Amino acid sequence: MSHRRVAERVAQYGLALLLLSCGGHQKPLDVCNCTPSAPDTEDFRHNQKHVPLPNIAAQNITVATMLTWPQTPVPAADAPRSGRELQLFHIGNAFVQRTFEVLSDCDIHLEISDVADKGAPRAIAEIPSDTEYCQTRQSFQAQLAAHNFTIGTNQDLGEIDPALPIDVTGLAFEDEPHPTRGSALVKTIWELHPAKVSLTQ
């Protein structure tokens, strides 16, 4: 085999490895047409999470602020929104550390922190699968693709390294603790859910 053919083969293998490492082997998700694997009745406080963002002024906070919110007894599975959950919050300077589409309810899960360090404490934000959030989901998917990251459905492959700067606006939501709701670096059951997000670079 000629040196030129060898070089071409090496280049081809290198490209293939690059695509695999960036998630390029995955077919991009149709983020606006997902079918949940579980019924709504199995989703904790489903109706409270799938609501539009209200047309009210958002309060500027940080992830550190969320980590200070008291974690009260777990609400009932059908508890209506109340208190802090009726307030809209904005985090303008955060980093998305991890993201994937949740198979059970099709929401896009994000773990965010105040700094880019991979060991930083995190909180969760989620973009619902509802039609009104389709544009946000598509935009977020495209922004991540520009950074060679493909949103998947396997949370073990959802870590983004390096973390990317992001802007998040959403309603506070108190979830229930459960083993699969996030990585060990998620330090609160409070979330921003529903949320709209946008990478800031």
Image: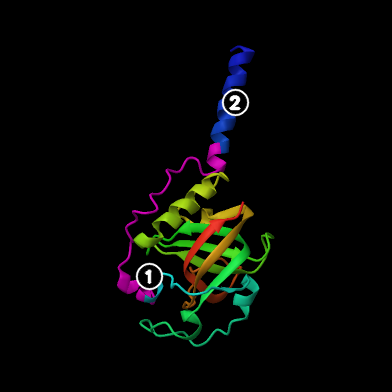
Span highlighted in magenta in the image = 19-47
**Does residue 53 appear to the left or right of 201 in the view shown?**
left
Residue lying at 46% horizontally and 80% vertically, measured from the top left = 86
Answer with the quarter of the image where residue 51 lies: bottom left
Residue lying at 46% horizontally and 84% vertically, measured from the top left = 74
**Does residue 18 appear to the left or right of 77 in the view shown?**
right
In magenta segment, residue 15: no
Residue 139 image offset from top left, x and y in percent: 47, 52
Q: Amino acid at mark 2?
A: Ala
Answer with the quarter of the image where residue 59 lies: bottom right
Q: Few, some or many C-alpha atoms within 10 Å of disc 2 (few <14, some 14-19, many ≥20)?
A: few
* Residue that label 1 marks: 50
Whether residue 61 can be seen here: yes
Depth check, front residue: 164 or 169: 169
Residue lying at 52% horizontally and 87% vertically, measured from the top left = 72
Residue lying at 43% horizontally and 70% vertically, measured from the top left = 53
The secondary structure that dominates the magenta segment is: loop
Whether residue 153 can be seen here: no
Q: Which mark identifies residue 11?
A: 2
